[in-house]
């Protein structure tokens, strides 16, 4: 199992998931959710998101296989989702709408799912399976969940430290990184479909 760990694969998987989850860029949304719903339980949100992502890592390929879709097709479709998520971050527009009714259970919905472990994260996990081993992706998920927990735990401090300008800059930077990842994901998987 240890010989399957690739530092390059772990680093790339961690960075892809970090850009997709975008927990730093989500600080304004998290602050808004906290104000509307009361408190966000950092530990519970992190554990639920971790469970969803690991389950999708293990069962996701079987689920899409059962539906008759191969990993490369899913990766190409995922590249479109990542592309539009990146456009949201870079251009400051809203393409994916949040359900206002979900505020009553804010720690689980929308924080753990779909904000942290959402369509972008699940798409990325399946897409990463086309390039990296499962152990690298699992470790990348764990590393990102530690970061998620730290951000959720220190939300008020981070908001004061970064300020509106700092948060906006981080969103744009991670948006551009995510845009590049989406393009690479598309170009490296589209050739396998023809």
Image: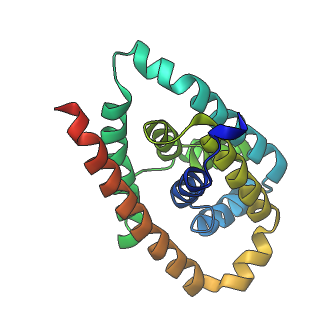
Residue 177's image quarter? Answer: bottom left
159 or 15, which is in the foreground? 15
Colour setting: rainbow
Is residue 41 in sight in this rendering? Answer: no
Count numbered badges in the picture.
0
Residue sitting at x 39%, y 70%: 176
Is 58 placed above or below 186 here? above
Q: Residue furthest front?
A: 3
Q: Residue at x 67, y 39 (%)?
A: 3
For this view, does 189 lie left or right of residue 104?
left
Residue 18, position in %: x, y? 58, 59
Residue visible at 26% across and 50% down in the picture:
187
How far from the left and from the top, in percent, is residue 6?
Answer: 60, 48
Residue lying at 57% horizontally and 68% vertically, measured from the top left: 25
Looking at the rendered image, the quarter that the C terminus falls into is top left
- Residue 35 placement (x, y as % from top left): 71, 63
Locate the N terminus by quadrant.
top right
Left-right relation of 57 to 46: left
Q: Is residue 29 visible?
A: yes
């Amino acid at each position: 199992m240890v010989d399957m760990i690739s530092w390059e694969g772990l680093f790339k998987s961690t960075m892809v998931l970090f850009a997709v989850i975008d927990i730093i860029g989500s600080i304004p949304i998290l602050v808004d959710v906290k104000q509307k719903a009361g408190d966000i339980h950092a530990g519970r949100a992190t554990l639920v998101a971790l469970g969803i992502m690991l389950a999708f890592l293990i069962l996701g390929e079987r689920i899409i296989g059962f539906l008759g879709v191969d990993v490369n097709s899913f990766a190409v479709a995922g590249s479109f989702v990542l592309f539009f998520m990146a456009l949201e971050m870079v251009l400051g527009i809203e393409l994916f709408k949040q359900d206002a009714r979900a505020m009553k259970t804010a720690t689980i919905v929308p924080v753990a799912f779909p904000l942290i472990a959402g369509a972008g994260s699940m798409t990325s996990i399946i897409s990463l399976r086309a390039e990296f081993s499962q152990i690298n992706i699992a470790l990348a998920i764990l590393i990102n969940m530690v970061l998620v927990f730290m951000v959720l735990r220190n939300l008020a401090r981070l908001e004061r430290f970064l300020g509106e300008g700092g948060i906006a800059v981080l969103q744009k930077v991670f948006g551009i990184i995510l845009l590049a990842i989406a393009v690479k994901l598309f170009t490296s998987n589209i050739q396998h479909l023809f």
